Image: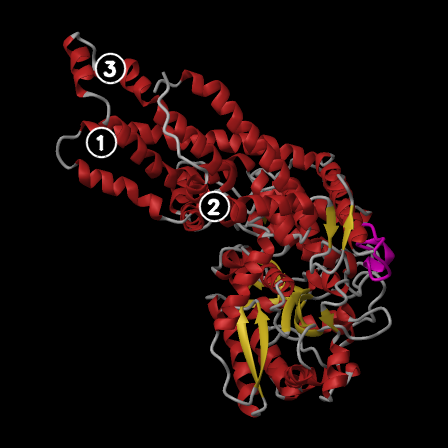
Amino acid sequence: MEKRVTFRGWMLPLLLIAPQVVVSAVFFFYPAGQAIWQSLFIPDPFGLSSQFVGLGNFEFLLSDPFYRASFATTAIFSILVTLCSMIPALFLAVIADRLIKGSGVYRTLLIWPYAVAPAVAGVLWLFMFNTRVGVISWYLGTLGYDWNHVLNGGEAMGLVVIASAWGRISYNFLFFFAALQAVPRSVIEAAAIDGARFWRRFFTIVLPLLSPTTFFLLVVNVVYAFFETFGVIHTITAGGPQQSTTILVYKVFSDGFVGQDLGSSSAQSVILLIVVGLLTVIQFKFIEKRVHY
Amino acid sequence: MKKSLIGTLLAAGTALSPLAANAETEVQFWHAFTGRLGELVKAQVEEFNSSQSDYVVVESHKGNYSETLNAGIAAFRAGEQPHILMVFEVGTATMMSAKGATKPVYEVMAESGATFDPSAYIGSVKGYYTSTDGEMLSLPFNSSTPVLWVNRDAFEAAGVDPDRDLSTWQNVGETLDALKAGGEDCPLVTAWQSWIHLENLSAYHDVPFASKDNGFAGLDTELMLNGEAQVAHLTAMGEWAKDGKFIYTGRRNEGGANFRSGECALFTESSAGYAGIKAEAQFDFDVRPLPYWEGVGNSPQNTIIGGASLWVLEGHEPEEYKGVGEFLAYLSSSNVQASWHQNTGYLPITAEAGKVTEAAGFYDENPGTDIAVIQMTAKEPTANSKGLRLGSFDQIRGIIDEELEAIWAGDKTAQEAMDSAKERGDALLRRFESANK
């Protein structure tokens, strides 16, 4: 038996969804349409003339081994950022949830990093790991480890992952913390009476009950890693060394805004749109099945 | 789409800037200078504004070189472009092919009736910004050329004679060995690796960097940076990097901090590094000409410039262009140029400004400050040393940077890296060619 509320006539419902439709049309459909249209041309930077090339931009991109490599870089980066921002957040949320006194203070402190803009976070981490004056690279040096993210691609990737994940831990913490508070005490107490210890209770009861939140955060964090980490990468590595931290979005920026190649940049946006669309579909189709609401 | 949105925002920002007093015609000037250089530009503008009452030049800083160019392009697309836009030498080909967006400087000067004598400008500076039929398209503003900076105290500390001959890379190689053996941790560091160790290296040895006279003779140019001379130099640099004699610090001028703090012994950097080094260095330093490989090509030929020029954009009133002409004439005047040259280490753009500087005894008081000028002007430029005119050059430099990093990290040989740079760069040149047919 499905419960259904229906409107009489169609004017009111239309009016009610109109703001959302308008916002989506202006800020999403129109730019996306423009990107698709522009991806078929090679325009000159000033917009004085442009040449129709059909799918030429896509052909140019997909035949570029560096562009294809950028997919792998993006995948590694997104997975690492998602893991590094969700696992510590969950851990901190569990610890903070157990506190009886002062949890408000911890909560506030843990949320702080979220207020730091990605570009600023990038500069902060860059400063700490600066190969010449960085505090952390200096300590690593005294331990005999020569930190040089300027030449070492792995270290550069590590650094952008940490800097991107750091601010995100706060965001994820908030959601996990709220979800933990919503876990019914009675269930946990019952398990405790049955003799289940803390971590056992956590894995068999709490974690499954957190699954809707975890799933939501998974989707949101992957999207974050794809699109919003641009500022961090721009300030720390600018995509280098070689192309070890050039993720797809960064390439859209550098080709479009540095290289003035708007055709290729638009084609990349279109490809990105498809990739993220597919990813979201996959997430909802396969992972959501394992989520208990 | 994103671009035009940003353009609109920029335009809105400009519209909100304080309006000039009544009858004065306003001229917008967008530049890329901050810090000391920003102050000097501001001072120039203020002096011009107070010297007459018909025009007011409004200067605004729009970020680094790339960002300033982008801001200008975005503003043009939104129809809110400034009158004068500072564009770095790398963007020259982009601006030149944007006919209809730019108004050539010779035309602006002729229409405004301001004093303008193209022959007053130094040939090797002017050549970079002049069309194939000899017309000056943009006004050279800040031009520099790479030189070798020496930390004399670091030499002494490593037990190496600071006065030894560093004119050739062969000698520099031996010196690096000696410095390393003497306990120096950072014998050599560089800024702007592609500009100094490839673009200038090619010009200095009179070997081509790209076909078609480095792009001057046509858009169908191809990179030739994988030639013998370039690969030999990069192989040597790669060896030095492996042995810890050349320290890589980054793609731009990050190395400047290492040198100015006294950490490094030798530093290849623009002559315009002078202002910063003079202000910060707590050690005895001197300037030498950029080294060359003895016996390679026709070395030493001349080095080429880096820096920026001022482009005038289309779409304004004739009256405003008159103001632009007046301002550009003021900037080219000998006294303004001479003090700019002395304060910054940038080259004087007119021969007259050089003479004024010499007459004032500046070179005697500051030995080495004339080395850049001599290095640029000692020989008549050849087709290989006039400069570079390549489309998408900012991106190509990015590719070169990546490939050079592969050499420094030991992932690729110099030959492999440069072959790959050529292949990737050529693909971009072909795209640029088809976009600007």
What residue type is disc 1 on?
A: Ala
Q: Is residue B274 left or right of residue B300?
A: left
Span of residues in magenta? B208-223
Quadrant into which the C terminus of chain A falls: top left
User: Which residue occupies the foreground of this view, B344 or A126?
Assistant: A126
The chief SS type of the magenta part is loop
Residue found at x 30% / y 20%: A209
Using the image, tell me which numbered label, if any, was put on residue A96. 1
Q: Whole-percent x and y of residue A196?
A: 20, 10
What is the three-letter code of the residue carrying label 3?
Answer: Arg
Question: Could you tell whether A14 is left or right of A190 in the image?
Answer: right
Q: Residues within 10 Å of mark 3 (few under 14, many from 20)?
A: some
Viewer can see residue B189: no
Which residue is disc 3 drawn over? A201
Look at the numbered discs 3 and 1 and tell me whether their residues touch, using CB distance below 8 Å.
no
Which residue is at the far left?
A101
